Image: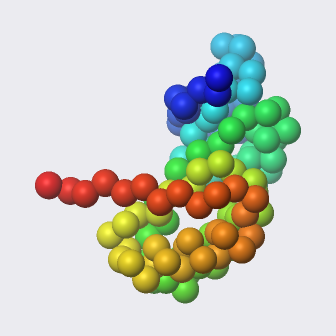
Amino acid sequence: MKSSIYIALDFHTKKEALDFLDVHQLNEAPVKVGMQLFYREGPLLIQELKKRGHSIFLDLKLHDIPNTVYHAMKSLAHLDVDIVNIHASGGLDMMKAAKKVWRKGARRKFHCYWQSRN
C-alpha cells in the first residue's frame, strides 16, 4: 500500500534534505518540496528525488495571471512530479489554464484541490 503522507523537506539545501532522508532511512517515502528549497535547488533536486524513487508533491502554490501560470505549469509538467498545487484565489481562468497545459505535458493526472477561507 502506498503512503498518502508526504514528508516535508523544509530545508535550506539539497544536501540537508537528502541527508535527512538518508539518516532516517526514508527510502522512497513520498516527499513535499516547497518554494524555499525548490527555488534554491531547482529541477536537479526533483530529478535526484525521482531517481531515488520518491513521489513528489511540489508545493509552489502558483498564483498569477492565467498566461503566467500556464507557462509555469508547462515547465513543471516535464518534471514528473506527482502533485503540484495552485492557489484557487487566482480565479477560474487561471485554474483552467493550469489544467489545460498539465494535461498536455504531464504524465500524471491533474488534480485540483482548493480550500475555502471562512
User: Which residue of the protein is positioned furthest toward the bottom in this rendering?
Assistant: 67
- Residue 65 x, y percent position in the rendering: 45, 83
Q: Residue at x 40, y 64 (%)?
A: 87
**Looking at the rendering, in which quadrant would you find the N terminus?**
top right
Whether residue 47 is visible:
yes
Q: Is residue 93 left or right of residue 100?
A: left
- Residue 96 x, y percent position in the rendering: 49, 78
User: Which residue of the protein is positioned furthest toward the right in this rendering?
Assistant: 51
User: Which residue of the protein is positioned furthest toward the left in this rendering?
Assistant: 118
Q: Residue 64 or 20: which is nearer the viewer?
A: 64
Whether residue 36 is visible:
no
**Looking at the rendering, in which quadrant would you find the C terminus?**
bottom left
- Residue 114 x, y percent position in the rendering: 37, 57
- Vertical comparison of 65 with 50: above or below: below
Q: Residue at x 59, y 45 (%)?
A: 57
Query: Where on the picture, by quarter, is residue 77?
Result: bottom right
Q: Is residue 112 left or right of residue 44?
A: left
- Vertical comparison of 18 with 115: above or below: above
- Vertical comparison of 97 with 54: above or below: below
Q: Residue at x 66, y 70 (%)?
A: 103
- Residue 22 x, y percent position in the rendering: 74, 19
